[in-house]
Image: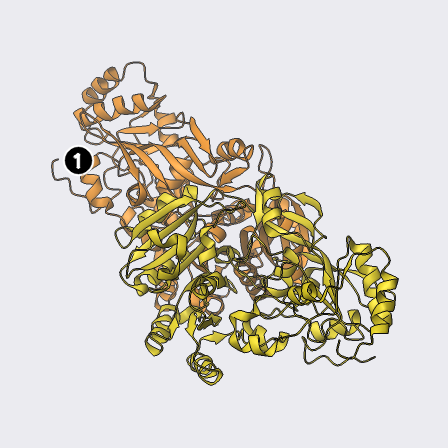
Chain colours: A orange, B yellow
Amino acid sequence: MNDLSLNKLDRLVAELGDIPVVTDPKVVRRRSRDFFWYSPILNELLDGKSADLIVAPRDESDVIRVAAACARHRVPITVRAGGTGNYGQAVPLNGGVLLDISALTDIEWIKPGVLRVGAGAKMNAIDAETQAQGFELRMHPSTKRTATIGGFVAGGSGGIGSVTYGGLREHGNILAARVVTVEEKPRVIELRRDAAQKINRAYGTTGIITALEMPLAPSWKWIDVVVAFDDFMDAAAFGYEAALADGIVKKLLAPVTWPLPSYFGALKPHCPDGKSILIAMIAEPSLESFKALLGNRGTITLETPTDDSPGQVPLYEYTWNHTTLQVLKSDRSVTYLQCLYPHDRLLEKVAEMRELFPDEVLQHLEFIRFGGRVTCSGLPVVRFRDAHRLNEIISLHEQRGVYIANPHVYTVEDGSRYKRADADQLGFKQEVDPFGLLNPGKMRSFVSARA
Amino acid sequence: MNDLSLNKLDRLVAELGDIPVVTDPKVVRRRSRDFFWYSPILNELLDGKSADLIVAPRDESDVIRVAAACARHRVPITVRAGGTGNYGQAVPLNGGVLLDISALTDIEWIKPGVLRVGAGAKMNAIDAETQAQGFELRMHPSTKRTATIGGFVAGGSGGIGSVTYGGLREHGNILAARVVTVEEKPRVIELRRDAAQKINRAYGTTGIITALEMPLAPSWKWIDVVVAFDDFMDAAAFGYEAALADGIVKKLLAPVTWPLPSYFGALKPHCPDGKSILIAMIAEPSLESFKALLGNRGTITLETPTDDSPGQVPLYEYTWNHTTLQVLKSDRSVTYLQCLYPHDRLLEKVAEMRELFPDEVLQHLEFIRFGGRVTCSGLPVVRFRDAHRLNEIISLHEQRGVYIANPHVYTVEDGSRYKRADADQLGFKQEVDPFGLLNPGKMRSFVSARA
């Protein structure tokens, strides 16, 4: 309960009227978690953190009422939806209200190339709607089937699709956001152009996002492809060539080192023993060109249309941080890192890291565009020894020019690094959250000018 | 008439039956030209070159009959369609038949992302058909309103759209080609995958292209935009940023130095005195992000939907080699070059060339992707002194790391340089044109093994 008096919470709940509230402690504690447990360090740090109650607004006017009440009573608010984050984005550090915005799912409109949608809409549901009109989200995380667009923008950075469009931090990948301020008289602010970056990867600490305007990509019939290679560096080299091939339309290119595929459950029949693989999503009309580029360098072991409808496990759920999850299913001793390789020494650095940690850091790479250059992100699976060694591994990467966005810290400032956009999020927070109520401690450098 | 006896041509014509033939010398001479006269050097070298007659096949079976007859009588064939080339691609070096394939316009089929079409179809007509289905050609030259797809593939290299998809030489930008061989019993060969590169920019010397399978891009509502800048290097720097911005969907980014815009006829009201401009085509949903990226660095002087329907002059007709044409309309003393800037020292090299030839080489750049990297092509307008100085300018560029595809030579080998694809065109020619009848001299290193 921290420093909140029961009395205060009672008064708050009373003021919320008919807005749904959950107070069952078991449910509240369970919903106060996300997937931070991929990190043994966060697993300790965030253990037991919980909200005091869940409030589930049905629409934006409910959000405004909750924000006003919390501001009056100085009760913290932590926004949550799918809860698929890995840095405790949905974990209240100081109790209070867990604001579950999952009901804000309305699609306001779809125009050619643009969508206006409630922050709580699931990305899979968005794609189902927009694909009927020939469009789809430009990018999504590997958690697309359960994650929401608001959570992705607030706590993600890129993913499947970033090999073509770059990450959320690139100009044009978030068109606008509507946020509700946490004040006694909340305001609704429309952030357009560069201003929209003020809510990008701020973990929900810079206003309550209620709606987003997102650019759409033309949708393709995507083909899931697995290619097996004798050597991981061959998979990486071919993936790099394919990423550079602007005439080949693709959504995902992810080389995965053996033995990671040995953990790949349902995919194992397509993962020959001892082989590293490349996981790819290629637009059907480009598949022939993709194969021509491949030549005899690898063997295609799977080729099937992408299917992420309910009950299906799409191929992308073996990439990005789902690779870690696939291993964690049978081996809880591992964790992961987030790397960005320098675009001008890409394969050289991949090979260098590989030699440095041959069995300890198991690489998979996700090719992306970053600042207009092809490079790769990598979320290697790390055999965890202790925090000291993990930090040493991070340092050794950084000393050698491989950037790390540390996923074993939970604050905005410590974790974001290369994933951040250029925007005055701290200054903006003074405007929209003057009392510092949006998950206090999450943006650790914030000191309220008014509290 | 060169070394062809009148008798031989008479017999040839007789064998063509009802295939349309034109022998009026005035018409034949006029149609034996293209836009090689942009080069004062080619203008001398190709002066007076002409076919002996024009043959205009109505379909592929007519092409086969002409090829057979020409092979039997050892009569040269030069393929021509729109005649918009600049290197004499359509100019017969040794007389013979001018094969006008303009009637091969059939669209065989359009699938999502792919088109199968006769080589003589105009690109503007193709886009009109495919746009109704939400697609368009990935790229086209500035001559799109009159050029054909066969001519583009045989004699072009890229253009508007290459800022996103790269040039024709990139994997996946030509999916397949059907060619008729020049033999007594002509064969029809389907070239797929890498093999399709055997006809790429071979100026029609490696078989008679009758049909092409081309990848399509999703079509956007494009907005023509002109931005004025005080300084050309500011236009170039912003164009570079926009080219690198993967979240902004664009088709054209071309900075143009003052005083070139002073020659821009109908566009002059949008070209303020003394200002360099950036010419852009931006997808409508990306326009706001484009403007956000621009900020206060330049002034938008034109913003209007792209319109290249009959009677309209689209903005792209002030870029690529149309820039040269705009100047030639009032000043016949200029010519041009074709440059490729190194992607890793781009703006530095642009500035260096600018300082080296301040008034003699007037720059405009066309941002492109080349091998997966953003760089720029440049077709500067050159104040022509003489051939010696022109070659000196070329050498000075090359010595400093700026690649030149010399447009003042007419053979495949001499002119192509960085525009070439990796394919054994010379070897393939022995297969499909064993007597060397396809515009003899154009692929100058070819020596027939059988002639």
Q: Taking the image as drawn, is residue B296 in sight?
A: yes
- Tell me the residue at 35%/18% (across/down): A20
Chain of residue at mark 1: A
Query: x and y percent of residue A124 in the render?
Result: 51, 35
Query: x and y percent of residue B81 in the render?
Result: 66, 59
**Is residue B211 found left or right of A100 in the rendered image?**
right
Q: How many marks?
A: 1
- Tell me the residue at 51%/75% (across/down): B40
Work out whether residue B213 or residue B55 is closer to the camera in this orientation and state it: B55
Q: Residues within 10 Å of mark 1 (few under 14, many from 20)?
A: many
Q: Quadrant of residue B158?
A: bottom right
- Quarter of the figure with the C terminus of chain A: top left
- Tell me the residue at 56%/75% (across/down): B43
Q: Quadrant of residue B4?
A: bottom right
* Badge 1 element: loop
Residue with the mark numbered 1: A434
On screen, B125 above or below B271?
A: above
Work out whether residue B406 or residue A375 is closer to the camera in this orientation and state it: B406
Q: Taking the image as drawn, is residue A296 in sight?
A: no
Work out whether residue B62 or residue B139 is closer to the camera in this orientation and state it: B62
Query: x and y percent of residue B215 in the render?
Result: 62, 52
